[in-house]
Amino acid sequence: MQFHQPNADFFVPDGTAPEAAIARTTHLCIAAHQDDIEIMAYHGIAECFGRADRWFSGVVVTNGAGSPRTGIYGNYTDAEMQQVRIVEQRKAAYVGEYGFQAQLGFSSGQVKNPRETAVVEDLKKILLAARPNVVYLHNPADKHDTHIGVMLRAVAALRAVRGETRPEKVYGCEVWRDLDWLPDDVKQVLPASARSNIAASLVGVFDSQVSGGKRYDLATAGRRLAHATYYASHGTDEESAINFAMDLTPLVDDPALSVTDYVLGRIDLFRADVEKRVRGLG
């Protein structure tokens, strides 16, 4: 499969032919950066791990430029660091038994430019070849601009191919903002308890980030544990780890639905829930 960027990377951990590797995909994550997939979409990885009838695959849209560098990576150039991150993402794909791992190599500036068509074209090509049942995206309340850019380009691609392939579920997932604020009746609960050893390894292989001073390995596990513990106040925990997500399926089902209006509607539900409780007991 040909992509727009000359530095794009395509990897199939088990050596299956690329066309077959893409076609077997049932769960697909489209994320901004290396390690985002492993933080936001472990639910899909665990759903497919060790299964012959389900395959999780990942797409990283940006090239990983501009990441912090300390310790053994302190003297690396930005270009060298990008190569480190590509290799780390391949390691994660191998550990997680992904169907395939694509790294499209766009800059953050390209991703955040609504007039940049190449990003959407590459994503359309992948979606048409994979025809996934479940798609994991960044959520539109995330506070990282590049994450929002990737989400918007992915929604545009999903809308463009909806006449030929449409996933059953599209989740907007947590990275740079939790979704515990969503009212429980609209909150998508994604169990992440299975194979905690694999979950830890997937984030841990990104040594350039963890050693660079960002303990994503501990923070990711802590968030999942906190969500599981604080999810229900009047019941015992059924899961030891949970991620929350926003249901983005309506954005694909209805291309006329504004992404901005949709996420602000979810914020309004949160506001109404808080107001009802405070006024009701005041």
Image (cartoon, helix red, strand yellow):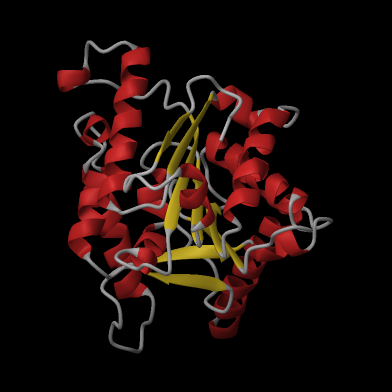
**Residue located 61% across and 30% down the image:** 111
- Residue 214 on image: x %, y %: 26, 36
**Residue located 20% across and 50% down the image:** 201
Judging depth in this view, the residue of 228 and 1 nearest the camera is: 1
**Residue located 70% across and 59% down the image:** 165
Which residue in the rendered view is the most extreme toward the right? Answer: 256
Judging depth in this view, the residue of 19 and 200 nearest the camera is: 19
Q: Is residue 254 visible?
A: yes
Residue 55 falls in image quadrant: bottom left
| Residue 196 in the figure: left or right of residue 126 | left
Q: Is residue 140 visible?
A: no
- Residue 1 on image: x %, y %: 56, 35
Which quarter of the rendered picture does the C terminus lie within?
bottom right
105 is higher (above) or lower (below) than 187: above
- Residue 14 on image: x %, y %: 32, 48
| Residue 106 in the figure: left or right of residue 128 | left
